[in-house]
Amino acid sequence: MNTKKEYELDSELSLAEPKQYKVILLNDDYTSMDFVVDILMTVFHKSFQEAETIMLDIHKKNRGICGIYTYEIAETKVSQVSRLAREQGFPLKAIMEEV
């Protein structure tokens, strides 16, 4: 049973929202546009149209935002991109930046 003092302490605690991170793909001169679109559709669950738009951003602006996630999810997505790119012999790089 909570005393009034314990209840007051509990009610003062607030849960902070977890920090958010952008996952960004970086342009390079070797990774095919088709592979980038495939990564965006499989790893980031983008539609074909969304994936094409992001791929063109990467191509024209040297980077494209794939999504915003909590730290653990962003880290997992970066690892997945790295592994899949390596398996296919591409140097595609994903990074994460705090929002």
Image (cartoon, helix red, strand yellow):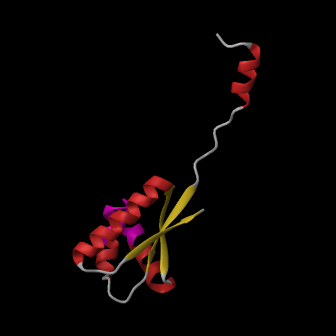
Position of residue 70 measured from the top left corner of the image (x, y, whole percent)? 51, 53
Position of residue 88 measured from the top left corner of the image (x, y, whole percent)? 23, 76
Say which residue appears at 52% left-offset and 64% top-offset.
22
The image quadrant where one finds the N terminus is: top right
In the image, taking residue 16 as reference, residue 60 lies left or right, namely left
Say which residue appears at 45% left-offset and 79% top-offset.
58
Position of residue 21 measured from the top left corner of the image (x, y, whole percent)? 54, 60
Numbered disc total: 0
In the image, taking residue 12 as reference, residue 45 lies left or right, namely left
Quadrant in which residue 51 is drawn? bottom left
Quadrant in which residue 8 is drawn? top right
Q: Is residue 73 magenta?
A: no
Question: Is residue 97 visible in the rendered structure shown here?
Answer: yes
Q: Which residues are magenta?
A: 38-51
Seen from the viewer's position, the closer of residues 73 and 68 is: 73
In the image, taking residue 82 as reference, residue 98 lies left or right, namely right
Position of residue 91 measured from the top left corner of the image (x, y, whole percent)? 33, 81
Q: Residue furthest top?
A: 1
Seen from the viewer's position, the closer of residues 87 and 55 is: 87
Quadrant in which residue 47 is drawn? bottom left
Question: Is residue 53 visible in the rendered structure shown here?
Answer: no
* Principal secondary structure, stretch drawn in magenta: helix
Say which residue appears at 76% left-offset and 14% top-offset.
4
The image quadrant where one finds the C terminus is: bottom right
Q: Is residue 44 magenta?
A: yes
Q: Residue furthest bottom?
A: 29
Is 9 above or below relative to 28?
above
Is 45 above or below relative to 6?
below
Seen from the viewer's position, the closer of residues 99 and 12 is: 12
